[in-house]
Image: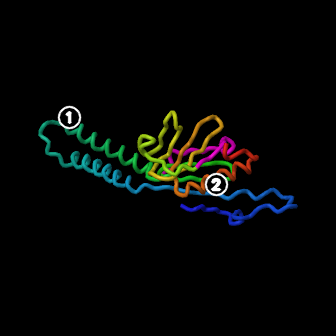
Amino acid sequence: MRDHSEDPREQGSASRPGDDERPEAPAVWTGRATNRVQWLLAAVGAACVALGVELAVDSAWTSGLAPLVMAVVGCVAAGLLMLYGTIAFVHVAVRVDKDTLEIRCGHIGVPRTRIPLTHVVGADFDPRVTPRQWGGWGYRWRPEKGTGVVVRRGEGFVVRLGDGRMYTVTVDDAEAAVRVIRDRLRMLGGRSAHA
């Protein structure tokens, strides 16, 4: 994903010596990452739900009602969990404006994390984020690594907060996200973006 600035004046514009006005508010940067492989898992989940419905509607089970109910409920529950788990984490959307970093997962945008940039002390590019590092895809937490939103293998960024927490996010063009976050940090008071 490319760096999408909504304000074309931001690119290459700098305040000229003698300008008495404050610099223009920074533009909004957006990025996203998608994992197409997870659609296969969503299809398997839909098949499980369909199997549960088929068993409930057209059942020729002769061993009793309890095994049939358990099979139907098991298929539908497993299918719905797979569907939600894959559709909720099939992509991530990142938005950086002048005040906040927002991370939204899936098509409904939940879970959503909003981090005020005043809480951020640094941002770094990570060229290789893998689901194996985080114990799988999705919204993850590991004591030694912090929180991760991992929808695919590849590039991402790591944001460090003043309280010691860290957020890792896989997103296309993560280097541009790091540049934008570091620029915002400099604009918010000269805080070191590399600390």
Instruction: Say what amino acid the circle numbered 1 marks.
Output: Ala
Q: Is residue 179 above or below residue 135?
A: below
Q: Say which of marks 1 and 2 sits in front.
A: 2
Mark 1 to mark 2: distance in Å?
A: 59 Å
The amino acid type, in three-letter code, at marker 2 is Arg
Residue indicated by mark 1? 66
Instruction: Determine the residue positioned at 31% across, 51% down.
Output: 46
Q: Residues within 10 Å of mark 2 (few under 14, many from 20)?
A: some
Residue located 68% across and 47% down the image: 193
Residue 29, given in percent of the width and then of the height, sits at 62, 57
Q: Position of residue 56 (x, y in %)?
A: 23, 45
- Helix or strand or loop: what does disc 1 sit on? helix
Q: Position of residue 74 (x, y in %)?
A: 27, 40
Residue 163 quadrant: top right
Instruction: Judge from the rendering whether residue 71 lies leftward or rightward of residue 169; answer left or right.
Output: left
Instruction: Specify start and end residues of the magenta stretch as a single range.
Output: 108-124
Residue furthest out toward the bottom: 8
Q: Is residue 106 magenta?
A: no
Q: Quadrant of residue 12?
A: bottom right
**Image-based side of 51 in relation to 102, left or right:** left
Q: How many marks?
A: 2
Q: Which mark is drawn over residue 179?
A: 2
